[in-house]
Amino acid sequence: MESGTVLGRTWSVCPVCLKRIRAVKIRREGEVFLEKECPDHGFFSVVVWRDRADLAQWTSGLKAPEDEGNPDCPHACGLCSGHLRGTCCVILEVTERCNLRCPFCFADGGGLREDPPLEEIRRSLEQIIRPGESLVQLSGGEPTVRDDLPEIVRAAKDLGCRYVQLNTNGIRLASDEPYVAALAQAGLSFVFLQFDGIDDDVYRTLRGRPLFDIKKQTIARCGEYGIGVTLVPTLVPGVNIRSIGDILRFALARSPAVRGVHFQPVSYFGRIPALPADGDRFTLDELMEQIGLQGGDLFPVEELTPSRCNHPLCGFSGDFIVTRDGTLHSLNRKGGGEDRECACEDFAAQKRRYLGLRWERSSEPSGCGDDLTDMDVFLERFRSSSFTVSAMPFQDGGNLDLERLRYCTLHVFRGGKFIPFCACYLTPLLPSGGSPA
């Protein structure tokens, strides 16, 4: 059913039965689509790029894999020989329980299964931690429903985990100061805070209740205890796309407590029952365009560069130093096409160091000034006042591209295996208005 310009061929899955099938990337009428056909459930076409930026330039330097990889991928393979990257961040799920029931949830949290006991979690940590290196993200469900979360953090640090990250909606952190203090004392490195906008209409739509005041209190509380916070908006067309600039300005005004913004365009897995229309998709290049339009001169889009560790369609980053007057000094290297083909573990280690330096609170800003040509001033401002704008659009059953998956560095530890994030949370989707055959 090809009509248009073929840009490449890959493998994907049927969004209904998740069977591995061939796919083609094709440009048609100013957009790029991933198209595939399942022998049982028919033809599927999903927009993956809307030509708001030059796709060829964005992906320059990427060498497509010469083989088809593991024929069992993305099912039951974990990190097989077909994967081209090591683990940068490993996600450990410590609960299925949650204190929200969000319409959009990749993990479909809120399960009733009992939490794994502390000793079981400790055994998992022993398997995943490399002393002095590892970055472990505690996730769920909502991890803060566990009273013993500080003990889990301490166990990870005692095993030599370099960075312990918490993925949270912030509700308990806002109201329970002794709990935040215990997390800080245990060695929590930084927090990924669910943060979808700066008005309660957004939260009522996406999270089912007003939460903006709670988010502000969480940021303030973490700031009091020196825990760096990165804001993580889920971006949904028709809900909060127009909030992108406001979120960025809100975050910048709260630097250095807020270390940056990590955007996640909505993906359709977990609690989403049906395959979305293309109008419900928000592509990476559209996000960059909106950052430029809504951020103005403060966040120039040309400062955003593609991921050099993951596949370039898996994200971007813009790195800055916040000056005393609240403006940004870019740290990004210009140009593109850098070699992406070094050892997979080298890439993972580089990315861990990058994330740790920018997301962790290391010191308070001093009165040293803003002359960044002075090396001492530059280093002090870099440590105390760095700020990162980044994104990671996850894949779902509609747009899964196994070429992207093979470059993944974000892995879930489950059942004794490291599993690429998008493969781990892959969910069957019903065709709009239909039912599985």
Image: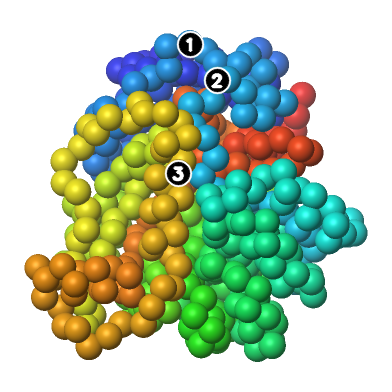
In the image shown, does 273 or 112 lie closer to the viewer? 112
Residue displayed at 60% across by 37% down: 420
Where, quadrant-wise, is the C terminus in this rendering? top right
On the image, the x and y values in percent for residue 235 come to: 47, 58
Residue 212 in view:
no
Q: Quadrant of residue 113?
A: bottom right
On the image, the x and y values in percent for residue 131 come to: 59, 51
Q: Is residue 255 left or right of residue 60?
A: right
**How far apart are the two marked residues, 3 and 1, measured between alpha carbons?**
25 Å
Which label was assigned to residue 67?
1
Residue 76 in view:
yes
Q: Is residue 276 above or below residue 21?
A: below
In the image shown, does 240 or 92 lie closer to the viewer? 92
Verify CB contact (< 8 Å) between mark 3 and mark 1: no
Q: Is residue 45 above or below residue 384?
A: above
Q: Quadrant of residue 424?
A: top right
Q: Is residue 240 above or below residue 28?
A: below
Residue type beneath disc 1 = Asp
Q: Is residue 405 left or right of residue 170?
A: left
Q: Would you name the residue on which mark 3 appears?
A: 349
Residue displayed at 43% across by 17% down: 65
Specify which label sits upstream in the sequence, 3 or 2: 2
Specify which label sits upstream in the sequence, 2 or 1: 1
Verify CB contact (< 8 Å) between mark 2 and mark 1: yes
Residue type beneath disc 3 = Ala
Q: Residues within 10 Å of mark 2 (few under 14, many from 20)?
A: some
Q: Would you name the residue on which mark 2 appears?
A: 82
In the image shown, does 46 or 174 lie closer to the viewer? 174
Residue type beneath disc 2 = Gly
**How far apart are the two marked residues, 2 and 1, measured between alpha carbons?**
8 Å
